[in-house]
Image: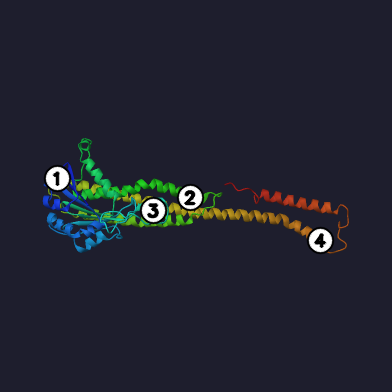
């Protein structure tokens, strides 16, 4: 568990709920409590007690179930005191929880099937409970998104970052949107490698000299892309619900608060735009994979037609020769040229002339032409 107190230009970190209970909320700013899903399950009573002390209320049972559910789709819900957002991340990594040691990853992780790049995309949900001055986040075990943003948050609080104009989150909602935005951008960083992998398969599918036999991986990739499309749609729906909920908040009392509310809406729309970019990219990749498969079978059908056309033309060339050979092979005593000394050469010359004429005709009609690859 990692606990951050964010106030003005300072960020301090601790890992004990007892210290937070003693210190309480900072005079200005807010608190971020980040824990793993198994930690949240084990320390549920202590966390609820801390929320009661800091915010004057606890999470309801249904929201606790949502935060503990590792298969829950992205969605948004709210109460009069806090908001809950469950957002399935698109991040690199697939680490499961060690049930005997809360917060620690398993030593041996089962390997999933499919392409390596798609196996690296973890879609485990991350839960956010947004209070007025407290943000509670529930992450998968050993969450790289949490650790990466925590490092970025601590770096932003340094003197050098302040001199460079770095801006700390001003509210729990602002911090939540920044973490969500980082999760979405994590997928955007992987899209080049994913695109390269699918382009490689397309080149193999369309290469007539290559026998493509990696169908299982390609089918897994199509199923994984379809699954990502569904996840992105759920993400977009949840963020749209959040944006609509922000519009219903009471009007800010001061000009500074109104300014912060506008910035929060702008950041929300920016997150939604990033998700839509991911949706567009995933659908384009899914459509590209489907198109490549269709083009592969079309190319195979065209190649088969070329082979059958060539075989048919060759059969047509030898058909008159078989007819002549069959006629001169009849069991009659009197057949013209049968007993002549030059009969064989006349028959052979005629057969050669007919074959050459048919080959020339078929060549001019492109029945025997070489297909350009």
Labels 4 and 1: the sequence-earlier one = 1
Q: Secondary structure at mark 1?
A: helix
Left or right? Give the position of 55 relative to 363.
left
Single out the mark in the foreground, 1 or 2. Answer: 2
Q: Residue at x 50, y 49 (%)?
A: 204
Residue behind mark 4: 329
Inter-mark Cα distance, 3 to 2:
20 Å
Give the color scheme: rainbow, by chain, secondary structure or one colour.
rainbow
Inter-mark Cα distance, 2 to 4:
55 Å
Single out the mark in the foreground, 1 or 3. Answer: 3
As drawn, 71 above or below 342: below
Number of other residues with Cα within 10 Å of mark 1, as a class: few under 14, some 14 to 19, many 20 or more: few
Residue behind mark 3: 119
Q: Is residue 151 visible?
A: yes
Labels 1 and 2: the sequence-earlier one = 2
Single out the mark in the foreground, 3 or 2. Answer: 3
Inter-mark Cα distance, 4 to 3:
69 Å
Front in this rendered view, residue 344 or 245: 344
Left or right? Give the position of 24 relative to 303.
left
Q: Are marks 2 and 4 in contact (CB under 8 Å)?
A: no
Q: Are marks 1 and 2 in contact (CB under 8 Å)?
A: no
Label disc, if present, on residue 255 of the rendered structure: 1
- Count of marks placed on residues: 4
Single out the mark in the foreground, 4 or 3. Answer: 3
Inter-mark Cα distance, 4 to 1:
109 Å
Residue behind mark 2: 202
Q: Residue at x 48, y 56 (%)?
A: 215
Q: Are marks 4 and 1 in contact (CB under 8 Å)?
A: no
């Amino acid at each position: 568990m990692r606990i951050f107190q964010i106030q003005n230009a300072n960020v301090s970190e601790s890992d004990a709920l007892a210290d937070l209970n003693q210190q309480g909320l900072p005079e200005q700013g807010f608190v971020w409590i980040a824990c793993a899903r198994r930690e949240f399950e084990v320390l549920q009573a202590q966390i609820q007690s801390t929320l009661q002390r800091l915010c004057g209320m606890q999470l309801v049972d249904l929201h606790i179930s949502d935060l503990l559910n590792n298969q829950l789709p992205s969605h948004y819900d709210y109460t009069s005191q806090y908001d809950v957002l469950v957002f399935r991340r698109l991040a690199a990594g697939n680490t499961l929880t060690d049930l005997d040691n809360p917060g620690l990853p398993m030593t041996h992780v089962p390997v999933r099937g499919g392409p390596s790049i798609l196996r690296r995309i973890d879609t485990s949900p991350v839960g956010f409970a947004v209070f007025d001055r407290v943000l509670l986040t529930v992450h998968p075990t050993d969450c790289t998104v949490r650790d990466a943003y925590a490092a970025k948050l601590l770096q932003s609080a340094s003197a050098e970052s302040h001199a460079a104009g770095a801006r700390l989150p001003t509210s729990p909602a602002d911090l939540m949107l920044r973490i969500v935005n980082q999760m979405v951008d994590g997928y955007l960083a992987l899209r080049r490698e994913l695109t390269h992998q699918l382009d490689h398969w397309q080149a193999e599918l369309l290469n007539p000299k290559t026998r493509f036999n990696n169908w299982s991986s390609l089918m897994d990739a199509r199923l994984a892309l379809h699954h990502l499309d569904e996840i992105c749609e759920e993400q977009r729906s949840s963020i749209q619900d959040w944006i609509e909920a922000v519009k219903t908040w009471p009007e800010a009392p001061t000009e500074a608060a109104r300014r912060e509310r506008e910035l929060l809406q702008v950041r929300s729309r920016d997150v939604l735009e990033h998700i839509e970019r991911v949706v567009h990219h995933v659908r384009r990749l899914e459509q590209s994979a489907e198109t490549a498969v269709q083009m592969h079978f079309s190319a195979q059908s065209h190649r088969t037609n070329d082979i059958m056309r060539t075989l048919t033309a060759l059969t047509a060339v030898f058909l008159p020769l078989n007819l002549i050979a069959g006629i001169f092979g009849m069991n009659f005593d009197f057949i013209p040229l049968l007993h002549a000394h030059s009969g064989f050469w006349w028959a052979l010359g005629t057969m050669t002339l007919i074959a050459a004429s048919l080959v020339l005709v078929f060549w001019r009609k492109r029945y025997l032409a070489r297909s350009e690859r």
